[in-house]
Amino acid sequence: MPTDPCTESAQFRITLFFGPEPVDGKPATQACVFNVKKRSWKGGIQVLVEITEAQIEASRTCTHFSQWLTETLADTALDDRAAQEKRAGELFVQALCRCQLDRLVQSGLTQENQRLTADTWDAESQADLIQRTDFIRSYVVTEMDLQPGDPTHT
C-alpha cells in the first residue's frame, strides 16, 4: 500500500490484513484490519478501523472520487467496468481506513490491539481526507494497476 511520507508513520510498518468487511451488529458499517509493527517493538499489533456508509459517501463527495473514477475508467470496456468500479470502491474504503489509522499513529499508538470505531470520525478527519486525495487516488490506481486515461486497460 503506498503511504504518505510522515515522520511518525516512518517508524511503523503498516500492512492491510483484511477488509473492508461488514461489522457484526453494526448495520451500514465496514471495517478494515491492519497489522502495525513499530521498529522498537518485539511484536506487532492489529488495529481495526471502522467506517460507516454515510462517512464513505461523504468522503466520496469531498474527494470527488466518483467523478475521478469515471474519468479513470473511461476507456475500460463496458464488460469490465462494473467489476473495476466495485474493486475501486473496496480500495477506496481501505484507503479511507488507512488515513484514519495514520491519524491515530500520529497522535500516539500503544503496543496493544486496538479498535478505532466509526464514531471517532469527525470534521477534522473529513478535512484531512481532502488533503490526502492524491494518496487515496494513488492507492487505488496502484492496487488496480491502472493509468488514468490509458487506453491499454480496456
Image (cartoon, rainbow, N blue to C red):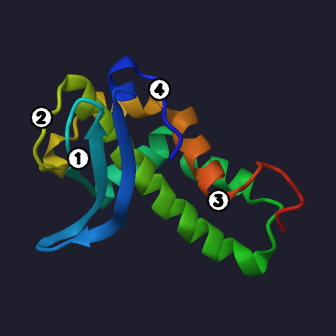
**Amino acid at the residue labelled 2:** Thr
How many neighbours does mark 1 have within 10 angstroms: few (below 14), some (14-19), or many (20 or more)? some
Residue position marked by numbered label 1 in the rendering:
44
Give the residue at the far bottom of this rendering. 79
Tell me the element at label 1: loop
Residue at image point 64% right, 75% down? 82
Q: Nearer the viewer, residue 83 or 71?
A: 83
Residue 144 marker = 3
How many neighbours does mark 4 have within 10 angstroms: few (below 14), some (14-19), or many (20 or more)? few
Residue position marked by numbered label 2 in the rendering:
110
Q: Nearer the viewer, mark 4 or mark 2?
A: 2
Kindly check if marks 4 and 3 are in contact, taking CB atoms under 8 A apart as contact.
no
Residue 44 locus on image (x, y percent)? 23, 46
Q: Nearer the viewer, residue 91 or 46?
A: 46
Tell me the element at label 4: helix
Give the residue at the far right of this rendering. 151
Residue 91 locus on image (x, y percent)? 49, 57
**Amino acid at the residue labelled 1:** Gly
Residue position marked by numbered label 4 in the rendering:
131
Residue 129 locus on image (x, y percent)? 41, 34
Q: Earlier in the sequence, mark 1 or mark 4?
A: 1
Residue at image point 56% right, 61% down? 88
- Gap between marks 2 and 1 measured at Cα: 11 Å
**Amino acid at the residue labelled 3:** Met
Kindly check if marks 4 and 2 are in contact, taking CB atoms under 8 A apart as contact.
no
State how many labels appear: 4
**Is residue 32 placed above or below 11 in the rendered structure?**
below
